[in-house]
Amino acid sequence: MINNDDVWRDVFVTGLKNAHAVEHQALALMDRQIERARNFMEVAEKLKAHRLETEQQISRLEQILSGLDESPSGLKDAAMSMSGNMAALGHTFAEDEILKNAFANFAFENYEVAAYKGLIVLAEHGGYSVALDPLNASLDEEARMAAWVDQSLPALTEKFLMLKRAGENPSR
């Protein structure tokens, strides 16, 4: 018979491993976008800063997993990283690549916010209080990035249109 505490732990550990893999996907997405955001240096700079936060988030997740005598899933990490590269590549052929990336980033950042909120609930109710500060720190970073993407979208769209009207290729 499975103990309910074991079920709680299994769900928490799985969530941590999934979040770790998603953060690797985020790195791949950001790397491709940073390379291609030549006409949108404000986006590239924000992505570079968030990339550093993402590396810290990965480290936090690894510390929590280590404290549970667990390790990240290399297979999940590799699969999600490849998925991130493929997703970013898919937008490179679009005339409005920067806009598509912004829309995808809005969805992705809010997904990460939801994932961290779920992990915090699991940590609170599962008795993993040592995980709360690192998870809350990551949640705050993701929420700030989600808010920035949301708030910057109007100006990004206007700049895209201005460049397009001037005959430039805004996505290059």
Image (cartoon, grey):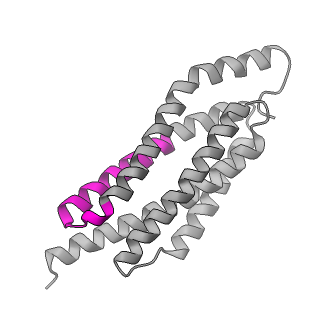
**Residue 76, image x, y percentages:** 52, 70
Residue 46 x %, y %: 62, 38
Specify whether 126 is left or right of 103: left
Residue name at image x 78 percent, y 19 percent:
164
For residue 77, which quarter of the picture?
bottom right
Q: Nearer the viewer, residue 161 or 19?
A: 19
> At x 17% / y 75%, what residue is drawn?
5
Please give the count of numbered marks on the rendered protein: 0
Instruction: Tell me the quarter of the image containing the C terminus.
Output: top right
The residue that appears at 77% across and 41% down in the rendered structure is: 36
* Residue at the right extreme of this rendering: 167
Q: Quadrant of residue 128?
A: bottom left
Q: Is residue 132 left or right of residue 42?
A: left
- Principal secondary structure, stretch drawn in magenta: helix
Residue 106 inside the magenta-drawn segment? no
Percent x, y for residue 75? 54, 74
Residue 147 relative to residue 87: left or right = left
**As drawn, 69 above or below 17:** below
Assess whether residue 125 is covered by the magenta stretch. Answer: yes
Q: Quadrant of the N terminus?
A: bottom left
Residue drawn at x 37%, y 82% is 69
Give the magenta-colored segment's residue range.
107-131
Is residue 89 visible to us here? no
Residue 109 spot, x, y in % from top left: 48, 43
Residue 71 visible? The answer is: yes
Locate residue 103 relative to residue 19 in the image: left or right: right
